[in-house]
Amino acid sequence: MQEAMINRAKQLLADGAVNRVIGWKRGEFAYDITPAVFETAEELEKEFVYDDFTAANVSKYLVKESKKEGKILAFLKPCDTYSFNQLTKEHRVVRENVYIVGIPGGPKLDAEKIKAKGITGILGVKNENYTLKIDTVYGEEIMPFYEAILDKCATCKSKKHVVYDELMGEEGDVLDSNRFDMVEKLENMTAQERFDFWRDQLSKCIRCNACRNVCPACTCEKCVFDNPNSGVENKAPADSFEENMFHIIRAFHVAGRCTDCGECSRVCPQNIPLHLLNRKFIKDINSLYGEYQAGEDTTSRAPLNDYKQDDCEASIVHERGVE
Ligand code: SF4
Ligand code: SF4
Ligand code: SF4
C-alpha cells in the first residue's frame, strides 16, 4: 500500500492537481509515525511512511492546511473521513482545497501494548500472517498481532469512508461495533464505584493537553483552557477538582461533535481511556434523541443543535434514576 500511495501522490503532484501532500513520516522510533507535509516527489520517496503504526488522523491538520494557497492531497482512513466530514460541517476546513484519497484503515498497532509484554528496545516490527516479529536491540521477539492492536481499532465502528475523491483498495462497511460494552460496564457500577474508577484514571492526568491538541473536535481559535485569566491555563492540575474540571468541560464541549475517532486516548501519555467519557455522551445522545453519528454526513443537524418541542427535558437524568 505504501508504494502505491507514494506513486499516486507523485502523479497528482506532477499533474498539478495538488501542490502538497499530507501523510506521515517516521519519528525517532520505528513505531513513532507522525503526520507530515510533503511538497516534492523526492521528499515522498525519502520519508513517506504508511505501515501498521500509521494511526494518526490527519484531518485536524487540514484546518490550517486547507486555508493555504493551492490544493493538498490527504490520505484518509475510514475513521479519519468522519472527522473530516464533521470539520466540513462546522466550516473549519475548506473542502475544495483538499483532494481526498480514501485508504484502507487498520487495525493499527499500539507500541504500548508491545512494551507491556516486557518487549523493549524496539527497532522494527514485521507482521507475518498476523504474528508480529519484533526486532529489538536484545534479539527477536514474537507476539500475536491482535494482542497489540489499538483500542480504537478493536472497537472500530466503520470501515466505510464517508467522504473521498477517489478510493484506493476495497471499500468497507459500517460495522456492528462492540464499542459501548465498556460504557455499559461503567453504567452498571454503583455511583461510588464509577466515581472511584474516574478518579483513579483522571488523577493520572499531567495536563499535557495532548488529548485536546489532537482532537479534531477541539478546533476553537482560542480554547477556554488557554485563557490566562482562568487560573488553570496550561498547568498541571493542583487538585482533584482541577483534574476533573478539564475533562468534564472538554467532554461537554465536544458532545454531539465527537466522532469517536479515539485519538484522545491514543495520544495520552498516561493511558487514560478518555474515549469512554465521550462514548458515554454518544450513547446517551443516541438513546435520548435517536441514533446519531457525528461526521456521517455534512448536512444533518446534530441533536444538540436542533431544538425540538418534544426534546427530553434536562431533568431526564434524574428521571432515568441515575444514582
Ligand atoms: S493527554 Fe492525557 S495526560 Fe495529557 S492532558 Fe490529556 S488526559 Fe491529561
Ligand atoms: S474527543 Fe477523542 S474520540 Fe472524540 S473526536 Fe476528540 S479525539 Fe476523537
Ligand atoms: S476544550 Fe473546548 S474550548 Fe478548548 S478547544 Fe476543545 S472545544 Fe474548544
Image: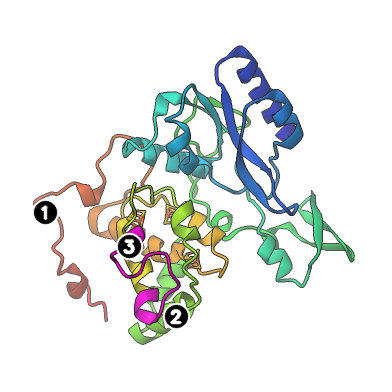
Q: Which residues are magenta?
A: 225-243
Q: Farthest residue toward the front? A: 228
Q: To which quarter of the image does residue 149 belong?
A: bottom right
Residue 132 position within the rendered picture, expressed as x and y whole percent measured from the top left: 79, 56
Looking at the image, is mark 1 or mark 2 earlier in the sequence? Answer: 2
Looking at the image, is mark 3 or mark 1 earlier in the sequence? Answer: 3
On the rendered structure, is 11 left or right of 117? left
Whether ligand 2 has any atom under 8 Å from the Cβ at mark 1 is answered as: no
Q: What crowding class fits label 2: few (fewer than 14 Cα within 10 Å), some (14-19), or many (20 or more)?
A: few
- In three-dimensional space, the C-alpha distance between marks 3 and 2, rounded to whole angstroms, equals 31 Å
Q: Farthest residue toward the top? A: 15
- In three-dimensional space, the C-alpha distance between marks 1 and 2, rounded to whole angstroms, equals 35 Å
On the rendered structure, is 128 left or right of 294? right
Disc 3 target residue = 228
Q: Residue at x 21, y 71 (%)?
A: 317
Q: In the rendered structure, which amino acid carries the disc numbered 1?
A: Asp
Disc 1 target residue = 310
Question: Closer to the observer: label 1 or label 2?
Answer: 2
Q: In the rendered structure, which amino acid carries the disc numbered 2?
A: Phe
Q: To which quarter of the image does residue 118 belong?
A: bottom right
Question: Closer to the observer: label 3 or label 1?
Answer: 3
